Amino acid sequence: MADSNITKRALALALKELIKTHPIEKISVGNICDVCGMNRKSFYYHFQDKYELINWIYYTEFLKTALENPINDSRELLDAICCYFYENREFYAKTFRIEGQNSFSDYFCSVVHRILAEQLSDIFPAEDPIDPYAEFYTDAIVCAIKKWLSIKDCIPPLEFSQFIQEAILGLSQRAAETRIS
């Protein structure tokens, strides 16, 4: 298993290097393999395509670490996500531009949706459908993060996280007030 992770990390580093100077669409599996001195069979043994490699990078660099370390609430998680993306903004600004099957954007949406659905299930009564709310908030958060990362001199991560939290809380409070009336 250790050899597998060494190979995957080498492929990840190669992709990260290539993304600095090439658009993702122009990077081939062959290019990635050339940079780290591996053959294409090695790549395909571990990953279906370069998009799965991008998802693996996010999973191992952020998600796995976040799951292993105690995060007290969704606010801390959002702070951590924003800080991670800010530190790696060149890489993720480019990866978010790709849409479609196996894209990082779709993968990240699914991760955020699962987290939000779990959070919302604690708030809404069991008879209320949670999925439409989770989809709405997922789309809003992911779209905001994509736009934020695309700005050259984007605001600092904790300031951006605070903005998202205030926007969501304000909207949620209005929705709750409307439901009650």
Image (spheres, rainbow, N blue to C red):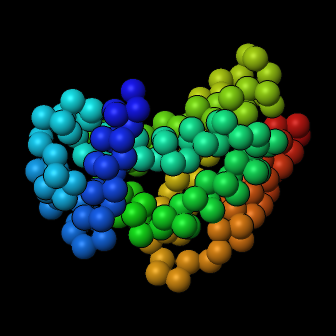
Does 135 appear above or below 61? above
Q: Quadrant of the N terminus?
A: top left
Q: Position of residue 9 (x, y in %)?
A: 36, 46
Q: Position of residue 92 (x, y in %)?
A: 42, 60
Residue 88 visible from this viewpoint? yes
Asked whether, in this view, residue 173 is left or right of residue 103, the answer is right
**Residue ID at (80%, 22%):** 125
Quadrant housing residue 23: bottom left
**Residue ID at (16%, 46%):** 38
Does 152 appear above or below 114? below
Give the residue furthest to the front: 3
Residue 55 visible from this viewpoint? no
Q: Nearer the viewer, residue 8 or 171?
A: 8
**Residue ID at (47%, 67%):** 89
Does 140 appear above or below 113? below
Does 147 appear above or below 151? above
Q: Position of residue 178 (x, y in %)?
A: 82, 44
